[in-house]
Image: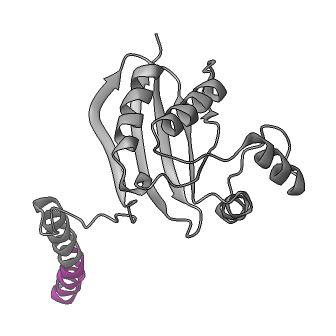
Amino acid sequence: MSACCALTAASRKPNALVKALSMGLFVVTVAGCAPRTQPIYQPSAPKESTVQQGVVHGSFNQAMRAAVQSLMGSESLQGAPVTLVQPLQNLTDGYIDTVGVSKQLEQGLAAQGLIGTVSQAQVDVVRQSLGLGEGQVLIDPTTVMQYGRLLGAQYQLGGKVTGQDEKTLSLQLMDLTTGVIEWQDTQRFVSG
C-alpha cells in the first residue's frame, strides 16, 4: 500500500508542476512583462504630405479647395513643371463630376503659373499610340512613367474619391522620371 501511495504522489507532482508553469505563464502574459508598445512599421512617406486629422468637410468642393491649397504650397511645383493632370477616379456609388473638376483644377493651376500643361491633342496621340481607350485610367506606375515621358511631362497629378456616407478625396503628385510620390493630400467630406 505504501508503494502505491508513493506512486500516486509521484504521478501528481508532474501535473502540479505543469499547472504551476501554465499559471505562471498566464500571470506573466496578463501582468504585462511583455513590452507595452510594439514597434509599428511605417512605410516610407512621400516627401510632402498633408492629412488633417479629424476635419470632415461639408462638401466635395470644400475638400477639394483644402487639398488644392495644400498642393499650391508644394515645393515640387516651384518652377511650373509640365504636369499631366489625370481625371480623378470616382470610386463611390454617387455621382461626382470628377472629369469637370479635374479640368478646372488643371486650368486653375496653369492660370496661376504653377504648372505647364500638356495639350489635349498630344495626350490623344500618345494614348492612341499606347492603345489606351477613352477615359482608361493608368494604374501601373511603369506605364504611367512611360506615358509621362512620351508626353514630355515631369509630373502627374491624379487622385480618387472613395467611401460612402463619409468620403475621402486623395490627391497625389508623382515624379514621372523616378516614380516617387512627391506630394499627397487626403481630405474627408460628407456629401450633402
Q: Give the range drawn in magenta.
A: 2-15
| Left or right of 184 in this view: 37 | left
Residue occupying the point 68% across, 53% down? 139
Q: In this view, does 82 lie above or below 57?
A: below
Residue occupying the point 40% across, 59% down? 46
Residue occupying the point 57% across, 28% down? 104
Quarter where residue 135 is shown:
top right
Q: Where is residue 93 in the image (x, y as percent from the top left)?
A: 63, 22
Closer to the camera, 142 or 103? Answer: 103
Q: Where is residue 186 in the image (x, y as percent from the top left)?
A: 41, 40
Q: Position of residue 112 (x, y in %)?
A: 45, 37
| Left or right of 103 in this view: 18 | left
Residue 103 seen anywhere in this rendered image of the structure: yes
Q: Is residue 24 above or below residue 103?
A: below
| Left or right of 37 in this view: 145 | right
Closer to the camera, 5 or 166? Answer: 166
